Each structure stands twice: as C-alpha cells, then as structure tokens.
Image (tube, grey):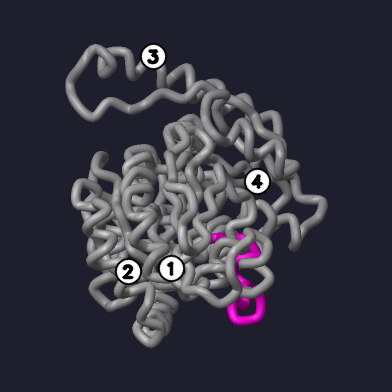
Amino acid sequence: MAELRSAVLAGGGTGGHIYPLLAFADCLRRHQSDLRITCVGSAKGLESELIPAAGYDLRQVPAYQLPRSVSLDLAKTPTRMLRSMKAGREVLDDVDADVVVGFGGYVAVPAYLAAWRRHTPIVIHELNVPPGVANRLGMRFTKHVAVGFPFQPTVSALLRDARVVGVPLRPAITTLDRSTSRVGAREHFGLDPNRPTLFVFGASQGARSINLAMAGAAKALTTAGIQVLHVIGLRNEPVEIPPDLPAPYVTVPYIADMELGYAAADLVLSRGGGMTLAEVTTVGLPAVYVPLPYGNGEQRRNALPVVQAGGGLLVDDADLTPEWIEGMVIPLANDAPRLLEMGATAARFGRADGDEALRTFVLDAMAGRT
C-alpha cells in the first residue's frame, strides 16, 4: 500500500466540483486522521465559502478561464498559465504533496500543471460527458482518470480507459433510508406527511427558469393534491407564489442538508448536473431533468442514460412551462406505482461507495498499479 502523507485536492467554481472534493476529503480523513489535506481554489469561486467552512485548508491560486476559440485571451494564455503554474508549484512544494486529485473547474489547472512539472502523481475525477475543459487539459499529463458513471467510458473516447469509481458523496446521502425518514423530513419543512411531494431545485445557485415555471404551475399542482418543496437558490430573485393554495407549497432559499429534501420527496424536478444525478440515483428517486440550455450539453448527456432506462423524464429548458408541468408532472406525481418503478430503475445508476473506490484508485495510481 502506497504511503500517503500529504494530498492536494483541486477543484472549484461550482458545487459539482466542490461537493465531491469535500466528500473525498472526509473519506481520506476517516482513514488517516493525521493526513495533511490541502485544497486548491480561487477567491471568486464557491469553494472560498464551502471549503474553509468544512474545516479544510484552502490555498488560493490565480485561475483563468481557458479560451475555446481564437481571441485576445488566447494570446494571454501562456503568460497566465505560467503564473498559475508557479502559484500551484509553491503550494505543492510547501505541503510536500504526494498526489494531486483534481475534480475539475479552471482552478484545477494550476495544480495539474504544477504536479506535471514536479513529477507528482495526478488523479482526475470526471463527472460529465464530455469532460470539462480543465480536466481535458489535465488528461494530457496523466493516465489516471476516474469517472462517476458506467456509461461515461462508452460514450466518450477521452474516457475510454477511465476507471468507474462512482461519485464521492456524503454518508448522510449514501446511508439515507427514505422510508423511515420521510415523515420526519416532511414535518421538518412543514409539509403534510401523507401528500405526494415534489422536490424542486436548480443547481447550487438555483435556476430562474425553473422557478418561474413552477410559480406558474403552483395552483394546478396543489389543486391536484401535490405539495411542493422548492429551493429558490441563494442568488435568485424571489418568485411570487400564489397565496392560499389548497396544499402546502414551501419555498426556501437554500438547503444545506439535501438528504432532508430527498427524504421528503416522491419526485424531483431539477437540473442535470453530475452531482445531482449521482445523489438522486443513489437515493433512488425518479426525476424530471431540465438541463442547462447553454454550455456543451453535458447535463443532457448526463441524464439521458437514466431517462432512456426509465428512471426519469427529460425536458428542454425552453419547453418547461406551467402547461408542460400540468400535463406531464401532475399525472406522474400522482402515480405512486410508476414512481416506485422509476425510482428502482434510477437506483441502478447510483453508487454509495464512490469515496472509498476513488481512494483505492488514488493509492493504486501512486503505487503504479493502474
């Protein structure tokens, strides 16, 4: 077994990069309480809030978006990369890093470049298809690539030789028993213990298009007997939900303990980020996925295998209207047998040991066993 004394974890920008990083850090700490864990992030990303709050050392380095086309930014890229690599090298030298484990986001690039120049093993964990720009760059410097879902190597040539390890998730998610915690979770949010429950959320910052469509469908949903738990998002403007609805419609800006929302839910309506997909499938919930309408289409590709297997529905952001919700979501939310069947199908894509499997992969990479 390779000796691991100091690990550098790199990733940031969005929750999809940060939450698996933190779950993996917790796994490492459970195995080695004296292990030095250092996280690399930026001052602007969500990591500047979440990582120190979780009790881990965050070293800030300059991070630059990598240009996707010929532009003035492209001319600036070499100078910026040298500056980032130097900052990353200073961190790795200071903590005498044994390995760099990257979870994506532009802030991972300085760590990848520094580790390459320093001859430090690099392990990359990728959630999306196709891989993000930062991780694609990192893959030039390492063969040690892990992915979250079994379909990823089959649909991306870049991931053909990746090891499927699952996604590091918090134990509160992986050990959740929805059948025993449902009533308590619903009471926690002021919901009826016995009504069918729709749990709605966007990405880590929320999704305004989802919020507006739900506000327009609130009357129809609750009239049909469906209650709603709706996470608006910390950085979204409040939406006006009609008053005096016939069933509970609870809005909250943010939920730190998402397991409570999953425990309360019979059905999810959400974006299709890799972290969301991992959590929803691991707890065995059916979902209506509304992929982001921009980017490189990874959210649609993430959700499509689950949807094609029968574990969810897929709707374009532009098509998510109050009328679509009334016609598609209401009948589904009131069909308990179908929800159970879809949840069981979704659960086949979930994996509860992603943190442990990634740790094993890291140790194998360090020992030259991959």
Instruction: Pinpoint residue 31: horizontal percent, then vertical percent.
Output: 74, 62
Please rate how many residues cluster around mark 1, counting C-alpha atoms within 10 Å: few if below 14, some from 14 to 19, many from 20: many
Look at the numbered disc 1 and give the secondary structure of its residue: loop
Look at the numbered disc 2 and give the secondary structure of its residue: helix
First of labels 4, 1 by sequence position: 4
Residue type at numbered disc 3: Thr
Between 293 and 255, the one nearer to me in the picture: 255
Q: Which residue is mark 2?
A: 330
Between 161 and 297, the one nearer to me in the picture: 297
Q: Which residue is mark 1?
A: 226
Q: Is residue 19 visible?
A: yes
Residue at image point 43% right, 47% down: 242
First of labels 2, 1 by sequence position: 1
Q: Is the residue 70 above or below the residue 266 in the image?
A: above
Residue type at numbered disc 2: Ile
Residue at image point 23% right, 29% down: 68
Residue type at numbered disc 1: Ile
Instruction: Pinpoint residue 355: horizontal percent, then vertical percent.
Output: 59, 63
For the residues carrying marks 2 and 4, which lies nearer the camera in this image? 2
Residue type at numbered disc 4: Ala
Tags 3 and 2 in contact by the CB under 8 Å rule?
Answer: no
Residue 295 within the segment the image draws in magenta: no
